[in-house]
Image (cartoon, grey):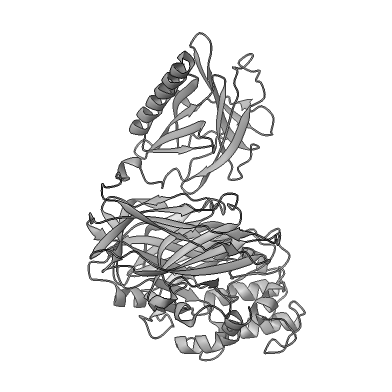
Amino acid sequence: MRLYVAVLFIFACSTAATATLKENYDHFVSLDEEQNYMMYWTMNDAAKTINIAVAVKTTGWIGFGISPHTGRMPGSDTVIGWVDGEGNAYLQDRFAPTRDVPLMDAQQDYNLISAEEKNGMTIMKFSRKYDTGDIRDLAIETGTTRLIWSYDDVDPITPNTFTRHKKQGTRSVNLFTSLPEVDKPPLPSDVQYFDLHNPNVAIPVRDTTYWCTAFKLPEVNGTAHMIRIEPLIQKQHEGLVHHILVYDCVFQEELSGSSHDCDSRNMPMGLRNCRGATVIGAWAIGAEGISYPAHVGLPLGERGARYVVMETHYDNPLLKAGMTDSSGMRFYYTHQLRKYDAGVFEIGQATSPFMVIPEDQANWQVTGYCSENCTRATLPPTGIKFFGGMLHTHLAGFSIVAKHYRDGKELPELLSNRHYDFNYQETEFLRKEVTFLPGDQLTLICSYNTKSRRKITVGGIATRDEMCLAYLLYYPKQEIAVCFSQNNYLTYLGYFRTLRDAGRTPSYNNYGEGLPPPYAWQVIRNGTIGKGKHLKDLQKLDNLTPPVQYCAARNHVLLQPVADIPNFVRYHTNTHLENSFATAPTEQTVKPTSGASKVHFSSLIVCMLPFLAYLLTSRA
């Protein structure tokens, strides 16, 4: 009984200590799955300083560090701290050129505030500048920061002699754009939730599957607000489930419960227009749940969603057989309505095989536009306010930037992550809401590293393909849901023919004959571009060809009948390569096909029919 009381007392004391830390810092996160290593932090922009506390279940030394965007120890900026048996506290600023014990930094830039060892836990508080000016330190920048951590149960033998760590790990965190705890209101007294689960889906034996399940949402009296969303990922399927998107849609009630491969012929026609339209819930690998700020909520019922389709991307590169999955999402809702209805605004470049990323590139940029001719016609005179968003590429993406323009002039960036981590796709919250007016333009710039790839990477749904998308959170909710641009298929035909004639793509006739469907993906994905004239031609084509635009509401109802973009600010991509073109062999630049600058959306659909037909009919 005495042992039980002692354990309970220690637990209560440690819980009280961490509760105090939660109150005194803006953010907190567990760096390990067992919650033995907790981190708390506050960003002070005025002083350009980060204040950090770590609470670790150990009475030995603890290590904390910033990795150079790799999550590995070599090159990291670290500190090691401990409290000795006499209560003396130590904090050493070190750097790690290798995996050995980090070396002492001649310039000590981490400032110890306090440290204590109590009830089996070590708590250390310290601070440092965002940029210390020390070449041995890594600057703390916006975007994803890869943290490393370690600890042992005993103190160092001497201040420079350390035992091997008992545990260590890495964790990606958005230090600047996590929602502060104070802005996460407690769940109201009337809160309820509903779960959306896939019905024990048998995972096909192929590398990529998109699975769609239709649901009728709970009946509510009038309108309720959805205020928190959590992923429900089946245990041991964290590597299988790549992302989940929930689309607000309108369909016949009898289709509720339908569950099919999204791209198969079994997918009901009444559900096919749901995908890619109005997103109300998004989760991707590495993310946790999302709580909406106290003044906004996603509408459910009369003013909002009543029927949804949940799209789940399964990634099965090892072609494992016999797997079933019931992952999904949980939505919390309340009848205590908040001030504003929130919405999700999707931007970027449409995912198609004509989003071409050459092989062996350290930095290749792709752009997606949402221009003034879409926003001027669809937004209210007072505009909307963005308060957050989720940025999305696949494995080759390393930077995503959303630029904001008004009257042809660039404003401060809306949202950016220049250290994007595919395995940590967390929703980011703006530190200050941004007003977006009718006629404003958004440009999404995605950067990719394909140095390890020997063939072209294309836009596509497979994890080895790429995407360039952003799901922006805003209020008050409007009809518009999607604002994409796309490379004009007609203008790229001549370029692909030059690749074919040069032997850089598989042999095909103009209709793809001789290749398995889908033809465009097979042709381009299995081609190469090289470093010379073909790379130069693609860079010029991307920068000279007028893109077409897709501006739509729920169920892909077009809000802008013509798909060309007559007025927009172009961001010139891949200009860093132009000096290398000076030594490349000359060849006539591929020019856009005559009359291709104005293409109605219906014409674009006609051009894409052979590829869409494959998606709709080829899978049983």
Residue 265 found in image quarter:
bottom right
The residue closer to the viewer here, 422 or 542, is 422
How many numbered marks appear?
0
Instruction: Name which residue lies at 73% across and 85% down.
Output: 508
Q: Where is residue 592? Give x, y as percent.
A: 56, 85
Q: Is residue 592 visible?
A: no
The residue closer to the viewer here, 213 or 161, is 213
Instruction: Name which residue lies at 60% across and 86% down.
Output: 610
Q: Where is residue 438? Give x, y as percent.
A: 29, 71
Residue extending farthest to the top is: 86
Q: Is residue 210 visible?
A: yes
Instruction: Name which residue lies at 48% across and 40% down.
Output: 140
The residue closer to the viewer here, 174 or 168, is 168
Measured along the vertical axis of the image, is residue 608 above or below residue 354? below
Instruction: Name which residue lies at 53% across and 60% down.
Output: 243
Q: Where is residue 148? Give x, y as percent.
A: 57, 36
Residue 2 as seen in the image, left or right of residue 26: right
Residue extending farthest to the front is: 1
Tell me the quarter of the image containing the C terminus: bottom right
Q: Where is residue 423? Give x, y as percent.
A: 57, 52
The residue closer to the viewer here, 505 or 441, is 505
Residue 366 as seen in the image, left or right of residue 22: right
